[in-house]
Amino acid sequence: MHMNQSPPVDRVYRILVITPDQQAFEEFSIAFCEGQQVERGQVRFSLHHATEPNRSILALSELDPDVVVLDETMQYGGRQSAAEAIASEKPRVPIVVLTDQSSEFVASNVFYGNVCNFINKSKLRFEPLFAIIRDAISTGGTFATVRSSRLSVLILDADVADRTWLAAQIEQLPSLQCRPLIADSIESASKLLKRSAIDCVLINERLPGEDAAGFIGQLSTRQPFLPLIAMADSRQESLSFEAIRSGAKHHLVKANLTPELLEAAIRSAVDQKELESKIAQRDAFIYACQQKEAQWQERLELVVSSANAVIWDIDYPTGIVTVNDCFTDVFGFEVDEHTTTIASIVKLLHPEYDPSEILCGDHRPEVDLCESIVRMRCRDDSWKWIQSRGKIVERDATGKPLRAAGIFLDVTNQKENADEVLRKNEELQRFAHVTSHDLREPLRMITCFTELLREEYADQLDADAQRYIAFANDNAKRMQALINDLLEYSRFGTLNEQPTLVNLNSVLDKISNDLSIAILESNATLTIGDLPSVRCVETKMYSLLQNLIANSIKYRDPSRSLSIDVQAKCDNGFTVISVTDNGIGMEQKFESKVFEPFQRLHGREEYSGTGIGLAICKRIVNELGGRISVKAQKGLGATFSFTVPDHLIEQPSPVIPKHHQRRSARLMRV
């Protein structure tokens, strides 16, 4: 897993904080708890505290933490450092050092063993804590591999006696577990380096007939993080300088070499190279982040430019507003060095609006976000509709705003188009109402007179005349039904009812009562699950569910008992409510057709109706911001499903008590 990847979120990640400083732990805990209230990709952590060495070692076994935060002042006794003591107990647990050091160059000295990063006690804020803990968990203990297994140390020396002595000493080092590998020439050393994973190389500067310094230089180029230690038979500053310049980390004199000095040199070289590797990884990570930031900055500039958005940034104490070049494009006014003032922008506001409606002017402590659409004056004295969106990004200790940022968008065309659409809709509504009223009266007269004709002159009319009168009467009634449905369809888009919290179980109870006769006559069983409460217009939700259930009753299969099942489930930010039946079904290819007004799949002789019910359902669902669909198979029934966005959903309704569960013989509550 790379450093910039977040850890998986299938469990809570355990953080063990080892520090005797109770105040530091409390500040650490407060920063983490407050920060996690902000959405962070659902990454979850739990904090645990140990104040003394013995307790911390016990906690390592009991807790099995994902990361350890270690106070650099902790002393574990003996020759082991605190990090080494933790590594011996949990070899692969990553460690983050808690330090008082303020300089990164000084604090970098804490990198040893399993340590993969550090955090300063004076900077215990969630953002850096979250990034450091995330990276430590993501690396998954890869920094501990050097300490958790034996180090492979390659000894390159032409002197047999020296090679043998070095190998024996390396095998017996007190606190490092090392496995010596021996080579007597550059060629044999090269083969071992290709064949084995080497953690450290000891090289004699004098190899008969070979260029030891050149080999050190080649190795440091090909494997920059391989620790190299040069050895000499005697102290010669020129040879020492050449070895260090070629890439060696240390220079040892054989005559003065002791086991302790050898161990210290190997440990120091390995730790130094390990630190360089970590720093290189960190630099690569920072560079990758900078590249991504640059890419997103470029994308943001393209979006802002294409949208012609005015970006503003306010400093409230001074009243200075910084804007981008789009300010001139939108309003026509030139600004010096991209700065203007709050007063200058407020002067552009139409008198009918309050200045608090723009630039986050509402200074209530609980309000951070602001949005409004206002009219603002341009340089040519024209007026534009401007959408203002902003957020207060900084407040003082009393809650008074210090800084805010946001955008102005020119929405003149959209506003005018929306007003025009609204006006047209109102005209259409009036037209539909007037037209339906004017048409209904002639149809009523036709029906009345055909009935009178049939009653008054029944003995004078032959069978054909009677049939013609019945035909005219039926078509007039069908025309009346079409007009009523058309009026209802147009009415649903213009109702001014306000949404309320509607319990869908209660709505289904009303529907089952209203349709009780149809349910009993069709021998239907209506099963209703626990449905949520939805913020909507109740009459529309009633019409939606009533139409779907009535549709199932209408298109039942007479060869079997009808079963209708109403259920709800959550699915990716939506709640899906479905009505399933075992009726006659249909072919799936007609899915889009059934939701269009006046579209029918059957003749009027087979099934009554005008074909407007499902079109009304679609219109209601669209108003909710959802989608309606049907999955069906001919002869096997159909499932009509519609989605409701989760922000409109409240907690599920409680199960209805037992004595209300079977209100009729054909209603089941599950």
Image: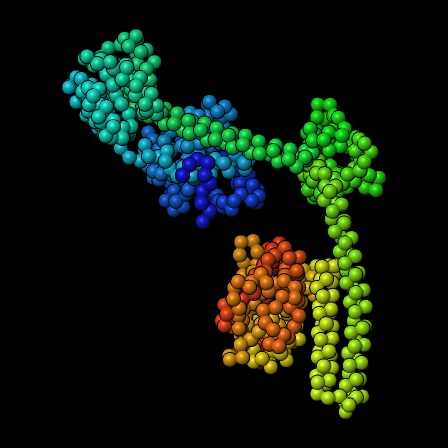
Quadrant assignment, res 397 = top right
Residue located 72% across and 44% down the image = 414
Where's residue 506, x and y in %?
64, 69
Quadrant assignment, res 368 = top right
Where's residue 61, x and y in %?
36, 44
Single out the residue that lies furthest toward the right: 351
Nearest to the observer: residue 61 or residue 469: 469
- Left or right, 651 with reference to 193: right
| Figure check: 532 above or below 607 | above
Residue located 45% across and 49% down the image = 10
Would you say residue 246 is visible in this rendering? yes
Where's residue 488, x and y in %?
72, 66
Nearest to the observer: residue 363 or residue 173: 363
Q: How many marks?
A: 0
- Left or right, 653 with reference to 230: right
Residue located 54% across and 36% down the image = 127
| Figure check: 342 above or below 509 | above
Nearest to the observer: residue 588 or residue 649: 588
Where's residue 344, x and y in %?
79, 30
Would you say residue 111 is visible in this rendering? no
Quadrant assignment, res 524 = bottom right
